[in-house]
Image (tube, grey):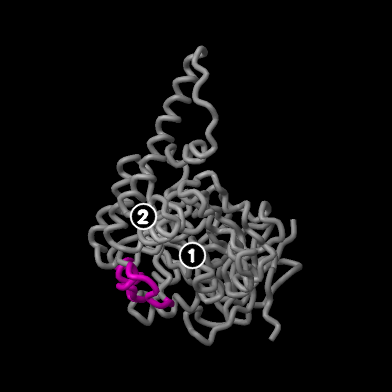
């Protein structure tokens, strides 16, 4: 297999010990074959890091990359099927255009993996996909699909369906629609299981919506709840407990106001975007201090820019803003590497630099949290996908 040796770098592994050393990393067969600080192994193909910093590829575990295409209006808007408030059977994978310019810009900023989610028009929005940012065919870019089911609470479903004079127009109805669909899926699963043990029972008729929710009920995937206000966050947790599903809070704009309560629940929060205006009432408590507060409370905290709300190429800037607002530097870097990998259930493949992991690496000219530092090179699955030439 092709080997490539990245040498003369400061390796920041982003593992639990925050291991950092001057050394080298050997890539082979799309994986990290070895890394160390002693004499590097012989390798025909070498890359001189010129003393730069090598980190894992950055990860944003909430985006709409490729679903809302750069420079297009309705023609490129494929994130919200707002003709039906309950659409768990929709797959983000079927709407992603990997040729969209946003992919290249994200890659050049050091982002090597993203979760692509349906939008938040529907209480039950559809299936999220975790993909790499390098490739021309989305099927070849998949890390995990489905990653999770998207649910949405708060103002977005209310406003979309209020304009149509359809349900839901209240938070009560939004929660009720989610409960109804989960209950139907639970009954559907029970009937399927009974039919498996009774040859005379034909079981339920196939239902694509309910089939899509079965991995969630089995605990194989998570529920990503779009929730800004604190009361919406707790509605998400209430529903999750009722049906025994695993929740992840997306945005959590007011999560920092109830950080102690969320820490006790052990629920992850994907914080952001906070580099934006307070465009609606439910985000009036928006602050760039939020991710730091959550991380200090012991909450698994990832950072998102919610592309295209804020372009993915600005994800490193979101880290810098969080640090300026008081977030620990290591927590900030983990919020776009190891923590989102853990939230996505992909920590065995991405998020840290370690032998056997996917060879997704970013070479920075200096400290990644220094505004002046430039991305010098990016590897995805061991392939050099970007090299700075300017």
The quadrant the C terminus occupies is bottom right
**Highlighted range, magenta:** 275-296
Q: Which residue was labeled with disc 1? A: 337
**Which mark, by number, is residue 59?**
none
Question: Mark 1 or mark 2, which is nearer the start of the sequence?
Answer: 2
How crowded pointer 2 is (Cα within 10 Å; few <14, some 14-19, many 20+) is rated as many
Q: Is residue 255 above or below residue 169?
A: below
Q: Are marks 2 and 1 in contact (CB under 8 Å)?
A: no
What residue does disc 2 label? 169
Q: Nearer the viewer, residue 271 or 50?
A: 271
Residue 278, how many percent across, how many down? 37, 75
**Residue 64 is drawn in which quadrant?**
bottom right
Image quadrant where one finds the N terminus: bottom right
Q: Residue furthest top?
A: 200
Identify the residue shown where x is 67% and y is 80%: 388
Q: Can you say whether 54 is above or below 60 in the image? A: below
> As rendered, which of 54 and 75 lies closer to the eye?
75
Q: Quadrant of residue 34?
A: bottom right
From the viewer's perspective, tell me whether residue 169 is left or right of residue 62.
Answer: left
Q: Is residue 127 magenta?
A: no
Q: In the image, residue 158 lies at what x, y percent?
A: 38, 58
For discs 2 and 1, the disc positioned in front in the rendered view: 2
**Image coordinates for residue 78, horizontal then vertical, percent:** 59, 59
Residue 381 lies, in percent from the top left, at: 65, 60
Q: Secondary structure at mark 1?
A: loop
In the structure shown, which secondary structural element does the residue marked by tag 2 occupy? loop
Indicate yes or no whether the magenta region holds residue 279.
Answer: yes
Residue at x-position 50% and y-position 81%: 367
Residue at 42% across / 51% down in the picture?
A: 166
């Amino acid at each position: 297999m092709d080997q490539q040796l990245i040498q003369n770098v400061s390796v920041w592994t982003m593992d639990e010990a925050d291991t950092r050393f001057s050394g080298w990393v050997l890539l082979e067969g799309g994986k990290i074959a070895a890394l160390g600080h002693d004499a590097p192994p012989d390798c025909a193909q070498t890359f001189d890091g010129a003393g730069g910093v090598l980190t894992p590829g950055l990860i944003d575990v909430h985006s709409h990359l490729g679903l809302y295409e750069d420079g297009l209006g309705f023609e490129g808007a494929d994130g919200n099927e707002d003709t039906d408030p309950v659409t768990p059977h929709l797959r983000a994978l079927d709407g992603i255009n990997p040729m969209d310019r946003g992919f290249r810009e994200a890659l050049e900023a050091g982002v090597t993996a993203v979760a692509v989610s349906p939008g938040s028009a529907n209480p039950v929005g559809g299936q999220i996909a975790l993909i790499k940012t390098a490739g021309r065919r989305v099927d070849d870019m998949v890390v995990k699909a489905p990653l999770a089911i998207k649910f949405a609470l708060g103002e977005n479903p209310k406003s979309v369906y209020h304009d149509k004079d359809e349900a839901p127009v209240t938070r009560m109805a939004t929660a009720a629609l989610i409960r109804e669909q989960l209950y139907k899926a639970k009954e559907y699963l029970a009937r399927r299981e009974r039919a498996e043990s009774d040859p005379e029972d034909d079981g339920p008729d196939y239902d694509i919506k309910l089939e899509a929710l079965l991995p969630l009920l089995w605990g194989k995937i998570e529920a990503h709840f779009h929730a800004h206000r604190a009361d919406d966050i707790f509605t998400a947790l209430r529903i999750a407990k009722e049906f025994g599903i695993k929740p992840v809070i997306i945005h959590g704009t007011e999560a920092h106001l109830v950080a102690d309560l969320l820490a006790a629940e052990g629920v992850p929060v994907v914080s952001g975007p906070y580099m934006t205006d307070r465009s609606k009432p439910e985000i009036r408590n928006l602050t760039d201090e939020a991710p730091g507060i959550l991380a200090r409370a012991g909450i698994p905290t990832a950072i998102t820019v919610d592309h295209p709300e804020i372009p993915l190429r600005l994800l490193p800037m979101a880290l810098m803003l969080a640090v300026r607002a008081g977030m620990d530097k290591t927590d900030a870097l983990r919020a776009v590497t190891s923590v989102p990998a853990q939230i996505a259930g992909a920590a065995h493949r991405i998020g840290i630099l370690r032998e056997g992991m996917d060879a997704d690496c970013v070479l920075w000219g200096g400290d990644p949290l220094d505004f002046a530092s430039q991305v010098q090179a990016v590897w995805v699955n061991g392939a050099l996908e970007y090299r700075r030439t300017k």
